[in-house]
Image (cartoon, rainbow, N blue to C red):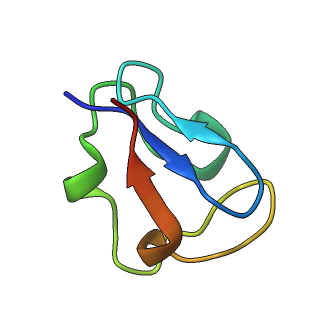
Amino acid sequence: MKSYECEPCGYVYDPAVGDPDNGIAPGTAFEDLPEDWVCPICGVGKDEFKVVE
């Protein structure tokens, strides 16, 4: 699974870690995050994230 970086603030969503503070379990792919999920640091939507190569 690929990691995704928030372009505005640099937060990296790592699917191996998930986002436990917001109810996202480890092993959750970015594509499987709820549509209303937002960056836990700056609050932008999924459309502001890019794949980390």
x%, y% of residue 47?
42, 76
Identity of the residue drawn at 45% across and 70% down: 46
Residue found at the far front of this picture: 53
Q: Total marks drawn?
A: 0
Identity of the residue drawn at 19% across and 27% down: 1
Is residue 9 shown left or right of residue 28?
right
Is residue 22 shown left or right of residue 48?
right
Nearer to me, 10 or 43: 10
Query: Compared with residue 17, is residue 46 higher up or lower down, i.e. above or below?
Result: below
Query: Compared with residue 37, is residue 31 higher up or lower down, i.e. above or below?
Result: above
Quadrant for the C terminus in the image: top left
Residue 9 in which image quadrant: bottom right
Is residue 42 shown left or right of residue 21?
right
Nearer to me, 4 or 23: 4
x%, y% of residue 23?
52, 48
x%, y% of residue 26?
38, 25
x%, y% of residue 17?
47, 21
Is residue 43 shown left or right of residue 47?
right
Identity of the residue drawn at 73% across and 72% down: 43
Query: Compared with residue 27, is residue 36 higher up or lower down, i.e. above or below?
Result: below
Residue 15 in which image quadrant: top left
Identity of the residue drawn at 30% across and 49% down: 30
Query: Compared with residue 41, is residue 16 higher up or lower down, i.e. above or below?
Result: above
